[in-house]
Image (cartoon, rainbow, N blue to C red):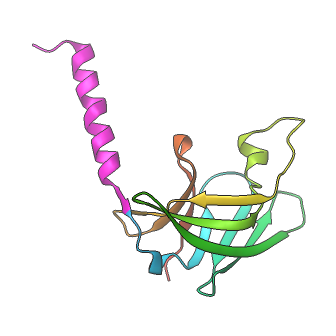
Amino acid sequence: MLSRYHHLVRLFAFAALALAACTQRADLRDVPGTYVMNRGRAADTLIVGTDRHYRRVYIAPGQAAVIDSGTWSVDTVGDQILVTFEHFAPRWRAETDAGPELRLVIGYWPVEPERTLGGAIRLVVDPDVDWAYVQQKR
């Protein structure tokens, strides 16, 4: 008879395998679209255009909208495919890395798009808490 500990280990291993099976590599032709952040207090929308430009509208509670824009490109590192957003402001850090000395640094954001079993493409910001931009249905 398995101990309770061994049973839990097997359960967690099964859950990890099931979670890994829930995502798959996205087809880059499907990356353009409108994405909405699934966590946080701000309304955060990322519009990825077919012309390799993006626009992002970020509205924190009680604040005016901030609109960022830039270009995006596709890069390959080994067998990993990354979408890189240039001149990107990680505004979500105000919520995920809260602190009095947080300074917003505009730079680039490389992310590997993934597709869920439901077909949605996700651009993951923080996999530990499932914080991601999720593509809206077309």
Using the image, determine if residue 8 lies above or below residue 25.
above
Using the image, determine if residue 111 lies above or below residue 138.
above
- Describe residue 131's horizontal placement relative to residue 42 as left or right: left
Using the image, determine if residue 32 lies above or below residue 86.
below
| Closest to the observer, 108 or 6 | 108
Q: Residue at x 33, y 48 (%)?
A: 20
| Closest to the observer, 59 or 96 | 96
Relative image position of residue 38 (x, y in whole percent): 59, 57
Residue 15 visible, this angle: yes
Residue 55 visible, this angle: no
Q: Residue furthest bottom?
A: 51
Image quadrant holding the N terminus, namely top left
Q: Residue furthest front?
A: 78
| Closest to the observer, 73 or 137 | 73
Relative image position of residue 60 (x, y in whole percent): 81, 58
Q: For the image shown, how many numbered marks are present on the structure?
A: 0
In magenta stretch: residue 113: no
Relative image position of residue 74 (x, y in whole percent): 55, 71
Q: Residue at x 74, y 55 (%)?
A: 90
Using the image, determine if residue 11 lies above or below residue 93.
above
In magenta stretch: residue 16: yes
Type of secondary structure dominating the magenta stretch? helix
**Magenta residues, start to end:** 1-24
Relative image position of residue 9 (x, y in whole percent): 28, 23
Q: Residue at x 29, y 52 (%)?
A: 21
- Describe residue 22's horizontal placement relative to residue 93 as left or right: left
For residue 83, which quarter of the picture? bottom right
Q: Residue at x 55, y 42 (%)?
A: 129
- Describe residue 45's horizontal placement relative to residue 114 as left or right: right
